Image (cartoon, rainbow, N blue to C red):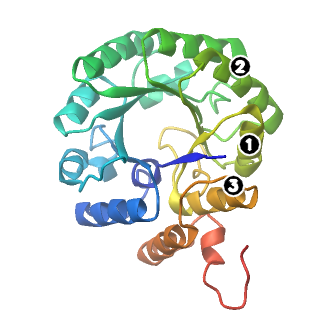
């Protein structure tokens, strides 16, 4: 069985770093991720550089990518201006994402939920007019640090809203890391039924140390697409106590142990995480990269 991993380290991973990663470094990371077997990479977000300085080079970066056939290079957009920038930067796949939480929506996108839903329609329309595929995202789908529990029926209504707008994919994000395996499995089964033949992607954060348990629950529900970030990088600047994504190498290692196929070379991903650790001067949240290539430890 195959599982598809979308690497989010360049976008979700880098956006909270105080150390600015240069455009040249980012381009090198993209090439190395592809060489490691990654088929999908979210390379940047098109947001105001004052709010997220790490993404100030998003337009230049996307224009300079050495694109390989069969690889999806995408960007995150939160408004119509972001869609315009993504199109002009040459991307043919955009993640248009809004929050299930009204409070988070106002902090993250400066829009109420109703305003965000109306804007989403225009974003998808513009993308499709320019032959750009859209991944319709729902942030805080499993809980909000400001509002608490997000009702299942509300999330399902948002999934239906996205599908009605004609998105090519659906993505649910546990932006706060509040999901638990049983609730996640139950919800994802319903989302998969609604989406029918369209890919359903799960974006998991490991804030409460339940990330890989939630991967297992999602696999049981039938999910076969996951977002990860090498080294366990990541976190949202607009969510209290947000921490990193599930680590690419940790997730792929678990999948391989369970005999799922990903096509990803764990060693090459671990090497990237190790190098970034040296660059930043502190350990990353991922675990497996710390074990990889140690001669006195077996990793199987």
Q: Position of residue 181 (x, y in %)?
A: 79, 38
- For image coordinates 62% across by 54% down, the residue present is 261
Locate residue 124 relative to residue 192 in the image: left or right. Answer: left
Q: Is residue 118 above or below residue 235?
A: above
**Which secondary structure lies at badge 1?**
helix
Which residue matches tag 2? Answer: 190
- Single out the mark in the foreground, 1 or 3: 3
Between 286 and 261, the one nearer to me in the picture: 261
- The quadrant the C terminus occupies is bottom right
Q: Residue furthest bottom?
A: 296
Residue closer to the observer: 122 or 244: 122
Q: Which residue is mark 3?
A: 255
Which element is circle 2 on? helix
In the depicted structure, whether residue 139 falls above or below residue 288: above
Q: Nearer the viewer, residue 60 or 38?
A: 38
Q: Position of residue 79 (x, y in %)?
A: 32, 24
Q: Nearer the viewer, mark 2 or mark 3?
A: 3
Left or right: residue 113 versus residue 148 is left
Distance, label 1 to label 3, CA atoms, is 13 Å
Indicate which disc, 2 or 1, sits on the residue closer to the N terminus: 2
- In the image, farthest residue toward the front: 1
- Alpha-carbon span between mark 2 and mark 1: 16 Å
**Would you place residue 229 above or below residue 161 in this image?**
below
Tell me the CA gap for discs 2 and 3. 23 Å
Give the structural element (helix, strand or loop) at label 3: helix
Q: Tell me if residue 251 comes above or below residue 79 in the rendering.
A: below
What crowding class fits label 3: few (fewer than 14 Cα within 10 Å), some (14-19), or many (20 or more)?
many
Marks 2 and 1: which is nearer the front?
2
Query: Could you tell me which residue is drawn at 73 percent across and 85 percent down?
Result: 297
Q: Which residue is mark 1?
A: 214
């Amino acid at each position: 069985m195959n599982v598809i991993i979308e690497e989010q380290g360049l976008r979700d991973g880098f956006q909270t770093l105080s150390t600015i990663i240069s455009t040249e470094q980012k381009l090198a990371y993209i090439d190395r991720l592809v060489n490691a077997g990654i088929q999908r990479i979210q390379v940047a977000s098109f947001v105001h550089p004052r709010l997220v300085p790490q993404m100030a080079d998003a337009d230049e970066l996307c224009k300079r990518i050495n694109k390989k056939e069969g690889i999806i290079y995408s960007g995150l957009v939160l408004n119509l201006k972001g869609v315009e920038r993504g199109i002009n930067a040459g991307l043919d796949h955009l993640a248009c994402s809004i929050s299930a939480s009204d409070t988070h929506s106002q902090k993250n996108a400066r829009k109420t939920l109703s305003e965000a839903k109306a804007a989403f329609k225009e974003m998808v329309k513009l993308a499709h007019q320019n032959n750009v595929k859209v991944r319709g995202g729902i942030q805080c789908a499993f809980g909000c640090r400001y509002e608490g529990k997000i009702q299942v029926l509300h999330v399902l209504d948002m999934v239906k809203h996205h599908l009605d707008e004609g998105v090519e994919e659906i993505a649910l994000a546990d932006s706060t890391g509040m999901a638990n395996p049983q609730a996640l499995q139950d919800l994802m089964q319903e989302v998969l039924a609604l989406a029918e033949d369209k890919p359903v992607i799960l974006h998991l954060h490991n804030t409460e140390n339940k990330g890989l348990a939630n991967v297992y629950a999602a696999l049981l529900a039938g999910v076969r697409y996951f977002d990860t970030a090498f080294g366990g990088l990541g976190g949202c600047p607009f969510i209290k106590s947000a921490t990193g994504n599930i680590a690419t190498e940790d997730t792929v290692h678990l999948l391989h142990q369970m005999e799922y196929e990903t096509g990803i070379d764990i060693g090459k991903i671990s090497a990237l995480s190790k190098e970034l650790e040296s660059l930043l001067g502190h350990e990353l949240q991922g675990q497996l990269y710390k074990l990889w290539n140690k001669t006195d430890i077996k990793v199987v």
